[in-house]
Amino acid sequence: MALLTSALPKRGARPVLVGGSAVEVYLDGVLRTGDMDVVHEPRALGPVLKAWKFDLGTGLRAWVNDELGLAVDMVGGKLAGSAERTTTITTDYGPATIIGVEDLVLKRLASAKHWKAPADMEQAYLLAKAFEERLDWAYMEAEAARGLVSDYLETLKRMLADKRASGNSSRSVRRGTPRGSTSRLGGAKSTK
């Protein structure tokens, strides 16, 4: 992601990593995906990906490089979430911007509800558990109401409360920041 960001013009919006690959970063690899879901202007990303030997795969959004075993799915030009809540991590290759954890939890809840994807409810839970004390719950409640997932957010809160009450954890989840860290999440190598 950082290489992709660095290959684009410095002016304008940066591409934002969303979806399962964003979950992977926040949870330090608990989830593994074979693609990167990216929000950015497709006309800007396409030439860069083509120069890197990615081919437009099936459909109109996925670029695939079989040699790298990687797909880049361009999910749109506008971030569905708060640009102010994004997290930027610094890597050896430059900055990489990731959807905010609150918005990512909400997207996972929406997928669990509307697409009937139980794995996404589990991912929402793992994210919420890892960042529970740092999440802006008031923001999430307001956005959940707009996104018609308030019921799933309440279920998520009950799951967290039940786990705290039981005092055990069946799965070890990394608490803290994504690799590279962020100022909003309390790390040292931040660029906002």
Image (tube, rainbow, N blue to C red):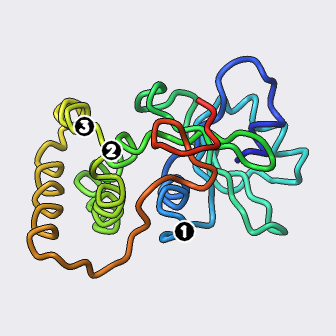
Residue 96 position, x and y percent, is 66, 42
* Crowd around label 2: few <14 · some 14–19 · many ≥20 (10 Å): some
Q: Nearer the viewer, residue 103 or 94?
A: 94
Residue at mark 3 to residue at mark 1: CA–CA distance: 24 Å
* Crowd around label 3: few <14 · some 14–19 · many ≥20 (10 Å): some
Q: Residue 113 falls in which quadrant of the image? A: bottom left
User: Which residue is the site of mark 3?
Assistant: 140
Residue at mark 2 to residue at mark 3: CA–CA distance: 12 Å
Exactly how many numbered labels are in the figure?
3
Q: Which residue is rendered at x = 43% and y = 32% of the image?
A: 80
* Crowd around label 1: few <14 · some 14–19 · many ≥20 (10 Å): some
Mark 2 touching mark 3, by CB under 8 A? no
User: Which residue is the site of mark 1?
Assistant: 29
Q: Which residue is rendered at x = 45% and y = 56% of the image?
A: 176
Which of marks 1 and 3 precedes in the sequence? 1
**What residue occupies the far top of the structure in this picture?**
11
**What residue occupies the far front of the structure in this picture?**
188
Instruction: Say above or below: 7 vs 71.
Output: above
Viewer-nearest of discs 2 and 1 = 2
Q: Residue 51 falls in which quadrant of the image? A: top right
Question: Is residue 80 toward the left or the right of residue 121 in the image?
Answer: right
Q: Residue 64 falls in which quadrant of the image? A: bottom right
Q: Which residue is rendered at x = 19% and y = 32% of the image?
A: 138
Question: Is residue 65 toward the left or the right of residue 148 in the image?
Answer: right
Question: Is residue 123 toward the left or the right of residue 183 in the image?
Answer: left
Instruction: Say above or below: 78 vs 131.
Output: above
The numbered dot on residue 134 is 2
Question: Is residue 144 toward the left or the right of residue 31 in the image?
Answer: left
Residue 73 position, x and y percent, is 62, 49
Which of marks 3 and 2 precedes in the sequence? 2
Q: Secondary structure at mark 3?
A: helix
Residue 136 position, x and y percent, is 28, 37
